[in-house]
Image (cartoon, rainbow, N blue to C red):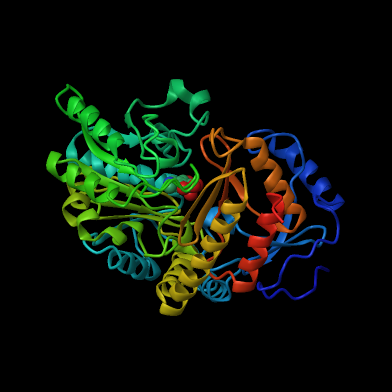
Amino acid sequence: MSPGEKLEGTELPRIVVPPPGPRSRNAARRLRRSEGSAIWGAEGSPIVWSRGRGAVVVDLDGNRYLDLTAGFGVLSLGHAAPEIARAVSAQSRKLTQGLGDLMPHVTREKLVRRLASLGGPLDRALLASTGAEAVELALKTAHLATGRRRVVAFTGAYHGQSYGALAVTDYPGLGRPFAAQLQDIAIRVPYPYPYRCPLARGCGARCDLRCLDAAKETVDRELRGPDPPGAILAEPIQGRSGCVTPPPEFLPRLAAYARERGLLLILDEVMTGGGRTGTFWEWERHGEEAAPDLLVAGKGIGGGVAIAAVLGRAKVMDSWKEHVLPSGEAPHSSTYYAHPIACAGALQALDRLMAADTRAHADRVGARFAEGLNSIQERSRVTGEVRAAGLMLAVELVRDRGSRTPAPDHTSNAIAALVHQGVLAYPGGVHDNVICLTPPLTITEQQVEFAIDALSRALQIS
Ligand SMILES: Cc1ncc(COP(=O)(O)O)c(C=O)c1O
């Protein structure tokens, strides 16, 4: 595409230069030289994005892609959603910075009230700029509310990469270089991963949550010890680990156990929240008995702006009250707390995400996408499992279905084959063998059909 060509966001891919083209390669080389190796994985050149609209991204060489990543699930309303752009632009002419804990601004007041009305019994809200920061805010809140420093966290969990968040994350290798600096606050228990039972029981199609019983035993033992946990932190569906979906009884049983033992339940809905899985919050699918004490939100709730939040029950959130500093200063703030532009974008995004037409569309295309992936699985030897919750989808690749041996090489090859067809997906899973798909909730039916066909070809099924 030429730089001036109009983009609607509903187009199908068009590859004009085999990716990565020369402009992408040159820009990536310059960037790599300036950034060093922290952000760069293996050698090799990525495509470099120049603009996007809806479910479409264009690279520097004019190639047009169908974006099934939505920027790691952030762009729930698509790239450059016009209503978000309008809200952000209007706010940028009105007020562009706040004064954190000293003086609030009106857009913050509106957003916080809106968020506090979204979570059923969770009628208090605090803001943050990233998911990791919000996870840490929830951990701080739980510590203040319980007086306990440790937290129960799950195998395969991903909660972000700042220090506090890394301490509760369990994603292969990420915390290792910093292990000496990380706080020992996590009590690790197995997460139900029916396709790869963490207890290696091979219970077949029906997971009986024996791992939850094992987790409870561990936690009960810790509760009798000198340094008991105060909270349980869980993702209702593990995102980065490859859309790992526990049986439906998991969340209600976990919540009931937390209540019985007087532990706070923190649900990390950074990936699952904002309507990505069908319900606005994933916990809502299981009814009020699965409601957490604290909920962490981020990504999709901003529709593309950098915002995150912690929602909580009043009695838990009010524990901050006793910790105001003698000077009168707040016990928690940051320079960009409730950044006005992010608040304005998020308010607009929430309106669109709650709208009946957005949700009905997402349900319809999500169901079709899942159906298409399931039909691929039936025809493919290397597709071990397809997991789908609304528009959070994953294809786990294996050497062969019998052995279930993870196939990270098939996965990277399939993702590269998708790029060459103009489709963007990303790898995930603790064995790097999952194709993760988190498209915008606004992706069109025609684009979904294209994606299914491209995936069939990438997995070499005719
Ligand atoms: C469940 C979950 N929690 C927390 C985070 C961290 O969010 P961020 O990358 O915005 O810090 C992520 C990011 O992928 C996530 O998926």
Residue 330 appears in view: no
Taking the spot 45% from the left edge, 57% from the top edge, the residue there is 307
Quick check: 71 left or right of 424?
A: left
190 w.r.t. 159: above or below: above
For the N terminus, the image quarter is bottom right
For the C terminus, the image quarter is bottom right
Of residue 102 and residue 149, the one placed in the foreground of this image is: 149
Residue 81 appears in view: yes
Taking the spot 52% from the left edge, 58% from the top edge, the residue there is 74
Of residue 378 and residue 144, the one placed in the foreground of this image is: 378
| Residue 272 percent coordinates (x, y) | 42, 55
Q: Quadrant of residue 264?
A: top left
| Residue 68 percent coordinates (x, y) | 61, 58
Of residue 6 and residue 373, the one placed in the foreground of this image is: 373
Total residue callouts: 0
Taking the spot 58% from the left edge, 67% from the top edge, the residue there is 78
Of residue 130 and residue 300, the one placed in the foreground of this image is: 300
| Residue 442 percent coordinates (x, y) | 55, 71
| Residue 143 percent coordinates (x, y) | 24, 38
Q: Quadrant of residue 443?
A: bottom right
Quick check: 249 left or right of 417?
A: left
189 w.r.t. 287: above or below: above
